[in-house]
Image (spheres, rainbow, N blue to C red):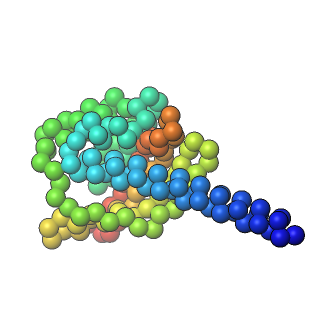
Amino acid sequence: MKTTLTIALIFLVTILYAQSSEHASIKEALTGETTAYMNRDYDAWASHWDSSREVSFLVTNMKMRANNWEEISKTMKEDMQTNSNPIQASLETSDFDISVTGNQAFVVYVQNMKTGDQNYKTYEVRNLRKVRGQWKLAAMISSKMGDD
């Protein structure tokens, strides 16, 4: 009986650790993509996306929408070249809901960005794919919370 209980506990701990490890890797990918964007580093930003297949991009408050890598890449590269100064802001994320099935992950969370005296709170929705062992973005939606 003790052996069965011990094996079951080890199995449970292993599953929970693997799940939290995957969640941590997913959060790292999300943070890396956002940080690269804020630093205006196109190459670092692009490295967080799965550019080998169809992707989707929607930022409602900027009225940006694209559903293929070529268009997303071109638009973001132009944006980062035109506005090359890093974004000076603090960023906080919370309320993560992460669902992982095989090599796919679906994530919903809240992002709060503070720049000077302004505060932008958004709902963030991401779909990620595991590509050669790394989590890469496949789709994103960012929608501002609040009235304005």
Q: Where's residue 78, x and y in %?
A: 19, 35
Q: Position of residue 76 (x, y in %)?
A: 26, 39
Say whether residue 50 is visible: yes
Residue 134: image x %, image y %? 47, 41
The quadrant in which the N terminus is found is bottom right
Quadrant location, the C terminus: bottom left
* Residue pictured at 82% horizontal, 65% vertical: 3
Badge count: 0
Furthest toward the front, the residue is 3
Q: Is residue 18 left or right of residue 91?
A: right
Examine the image and state in which quarter residue 8 appears.
bottom right
**Residue, x 30% and y 41% (percent of image)?**
45
> Which residue in the rendered view is the most extreme toward the right?
1
Res 125 visible: no
Q: Nearer the viewer, residue 38 or 121?
A: 38
At 32% from the left edge and 37% from the top edge, which residue is drawn? 46
Q: Residue at x 30, y 33 (%)?
A: 73
Quarter residue 111 falls in: bottom left
Q: Position of residue 125 (x, y in %)?
A: 44, 54
